[in-house]
Image (cartoon, grey):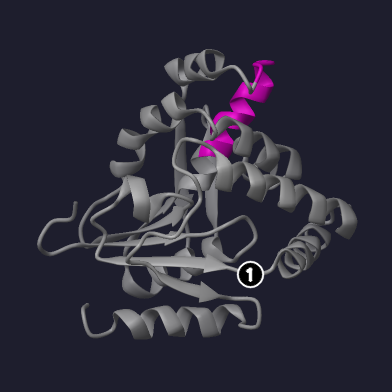
Amino acid sequence: MAADSAYVVAIDGPSGSGKGSLAMKIATRLGFHLLDSGAIYRLLALKSLQQGVDLDQQQAVLEVLDDFNIRFEVGEELSAAFLDDIDVTDELRREETGDAASRVARHAAVREALLGLQRGFFKAPGLVADGRDMGTVVFPDAQFKFFLYASIEIRAERRYKQLISMGLSANIAELLTDIAERDERDQNRSASPLIPAEDALVVDSSLLDSSQVVELVLGHMKDSI
């Protein structure tokens, strides 16, 4: 998948495991490009919601891709997402959008249609790809593969703190239910289910802070880059 002088770092895991933050920090430290595949699915879900599309109808979602104009602007700490040249970063963080993205992602034809878009992010000197099937489907030949997870309780608590810090209301019980339902959909969908790649390093981030996870991952990679 990668050119001789470039690398792909695939980071997969369930919602709230910390993979997005990890991917951003690894990309910054290495000077690599960044692919937030979850944001692509959220953008597609958001546009589908805006158009009143039935998220459970595969063909209807596919038709949204006929006019799907997105881009990202990545800074040192944050990544901004644009849909039709409008910054929709805040909308993507909402639980409603995340839930919709999980529903959209179940469709095999939609996942297939987005493969080329995702692989197009790969450029020298390298790419850090964050998602749920980066190491199994999108970049199966990635030189480095990680699967990050944490307990549902820890992930719900992290999400609660994130939403509160953004000035949004949140309820732990509801978050626990939402995360459990999303895990169920992601792990049991027929197309690209959420599972670790056979050659991935599995990391439990439940009792680690973000800096510890970053150092663990970089330490695993240091002899090869």
Q: Residue at x 35, y 65 (%)?
A: 145
**Taking the image as drawn, is residue 166 in sight?**
yes
Q: Is residue 145 left or right of residue 68?
A: left
Position in image of residue 144 (x %, y %): 30, 67
Q: Is residue 220 positioned above or below 149 on the image?
A: below
Q: Assign the C terminus to one quadrant of the image.
A: bottom left
Q: Is residue 25 left or right of residue 186?
A: left
Q: Name the kind of residue labelled 1 in the image.
A: Ala
Q: Position of residue 4 (x, y in %)?
A: 9, 62
Residue lying furthest left: 4
Residue 76 in sight from this viewpoint: no
Q: Identify the residue shown where x is 86% and y is 51%.
A: 174
Up/down of 99 relative to 122, above or below = above
Q: Where does the magenta region start and end? A: 41-54
- Residue 138 location, x and y as percent? 33, 46
Secondary structure type for disc 1: loop
Q: Residue at x 45, y 29 (%)?
A: 108
Residue 164, image quadrant? bottom right
The foreground one among 93 and 72 is 93
Residue beneath label 1, please? 150
**Taken as a whole, is the magenta stretch helix, strand or loop?**
helix
Q: Is residue 44 magenta?
A: yes
| Residue 112 percent coordinates (x, y) | 37, 30
Circle 1 Cα neighbour tier, 10 Å, few/some/many (<14 / 14–19 / ≥20): many
Labels in figure, total = 1
State the residue in front, 60 or 47. Answer: 60
Give the residue displayed 45% in from the left and 27% down from the top: 110
